[in-house]
Amino acid sequence: MKTKKFVTVLGLLIVMGMTVSACSLNIERNPDGSLAVESNMTEASLQAEITAAIADPLVHDLTADLRDGYVFVSAERDRVMSDETDTMTFRLDLGVGDGHLTATISDARLNDLPIEEARVAVWNERIATKLERAGQRNPDSKLQAVTISEDAITMVWRIETARSRGG
């Protein structure tokens, strides 16, 4: 009876999460009884999450172009006390580390000049946190895989259940 109640509550939480989120979900039971939850994030949702993670009011018109295996990000950035605009670009790679999403920005440039490493490090952390929260549906889940295609970012999560824990 506890398992049935757990599955019902889990199902309700996932449905509620989907109505709030821009990610789609696919849920399957693994042979050991745990759940495999696959979440997909679109390019538009990704752009919104990256914009929020960068949190720079001078950055606008950000685009995240999903490519096979990575994301190419470009944006415009207004100059302080000037009418001029700079072009910002970087490559974003996503991975998995210890059950969590990792983000690695490389080749970050502002008008073809490198962006400071300290700023990029903060962006890496913020982007990973924002995207993980957007894709994760259960706080006890562990990320197993992330893939980037030209259509979406797919994250696969593992959720332990009483059955998979041997209970």
Image (cartoon, grey):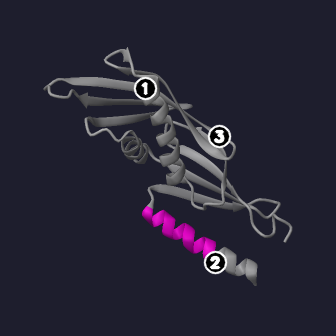
Amino acid bearing label 1: Phe
Q: Nearer the viewer, mark 2 or mark 3?
A: 3
Which residue is identified by label 3?
96
Nearer to me, 123 or 11? 123
Could you tell me what secondary structure mostly forms the magenta stretch? helix
Which residue is identified by label 1?
90
| Up/down of 167 relative to 150, above or below | below
The answer to whether residue 90 is left or right of residue 1 is left
Mark 1: few, some, or many residues within 10 Å (few <14, many ≥20)? many
The answer to whether residue 136 is left or right of residue 61 is right
Is residue 137 within the magenta segment?
no
Outermost residue toward the right? 166
Q: Disc 1 versus disc 3: distance between alpha carbons?
A: 20 Å
Residue 151 place in picture, x, y as percent: 49, 41
Amino acid bearing label 2: Thr
Residue range of the region highlighted in magenta in the rendering: 8-20
The tag earlier along the polypeptide, 2 or 3, is 2
- Tell me the element at label 2: helix
The tag earlier along the polypeptide, 2 or 1, is 2
Nearer to me, 120 or 32? 120
Which residue is identified by label 2?
8
| Up/down of 4 relative to 84, above or below | below
